[in-house]
Image (spheres, rainbow, N blue to C red):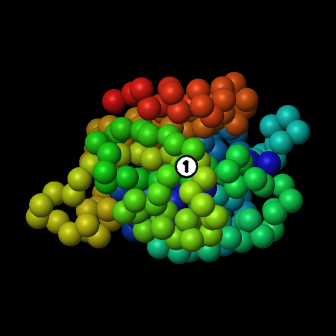
Amino acid sequence: MKLIIGLGNIGKAYINTNHNVGFMVADKLAKNLGIKFSQQDCKSDVAIGFFGDEKVIIAKPRTYMNSSGDALREFLNKYKDQIDIGEDVVIVYDDIDLQVGTIRVKESGSAGTHNGMKSIMTNVEGDRIKRVRVGIGCKPENMTLVDFVLSRIGEGSPIFEATKLASEGLAQWLNKEISFSTLMQKMNSQG
């Protein structure tokens, strides 16, 4: 089983905002795989599909960003015999420390400055959890960090292309067309 969790905030006010990049990738990934967000489970909106003999869950937590780890904990408790946290789970989120539209894929690491990832990491032993980060760039000097991450992504921003590329790469990995290490090499070599 594979679990992809896109981080973001629920509600129309947050659509196409910097902090909802994880939700954007999750939506595009579900579309790429031909599955829909048609139910709720583990404090999340979920899209479920089967690829070969493997179940895939794409989740968008309904807990709001700073409590994203609550949803992960629910999934880990419910599917404890089916999920290996270091192998089967991927977290997708925005990153202010990356240039706008840059994608970085890693198999482990710290939460950095991201509150959603900090919440996720409180539910994981060690730092071994796959992640896909999409750069939203540094906040402008005249904005608070909260205002920046909750601001709308500008029309024509490279973030839209990056979310498309990230979703396509994850779809290839889920369909066993590429390994996760190949996904890392492919995404990390761009930008």
Instruction: Inspect this view and state whether residue 78 appears.
Output: yes
| 168 w.r.t. 96: above or below | above
SS under mark 1? loop
Q: Position of residue 106 (x, y in %)?
A: 52, 42
x then y, percent, for residue 36:
68, 50
Q: Position of residue 174 (x, y in %)?
A: 70, 36
Residue 6 versus residue 122: which sits nearer the camera? Answer: 122
For residue 171, which quarter of the picture? top right
Would residue 140 be found to the left or right of residue 99 on screen? left
Q: Residue at x 29, y 70 (%)?
A: 146
Tell me the quarter of the picture where residue 40 sits.
Answer: bottom right
Give the position of the C terminus as an image quadrant: top left
Compared to residue 14, the image places residue 189 above or below, namely above
Q: Is residue 149 left or right of residue 61?
A: left
Q: Residue at x 47, y 31 (%)?
A: 187
Name which residue lies at 81% across and 68% down. 78
Task: Out of 21 and 110, give the one closest to the viewer.
Answer: 110
Please give the count of numbered marks on the rendered protein. Answer: 1
The amino acid pointed to by label 1 is Ser
Front-lying residue, 83 or 60: 83
Left or right placement of residue 155 versus residue 49 in this view: left
Res 11 seen here: no
Residue at 51 percent of width and 27 percent of height = 185
Q: Residues within 10 Å of mark 1 (few under 14, many from 20)?
A: few
Residue placed most toward the observer, 131 or 161: 131
Residue matched to label 1: 108
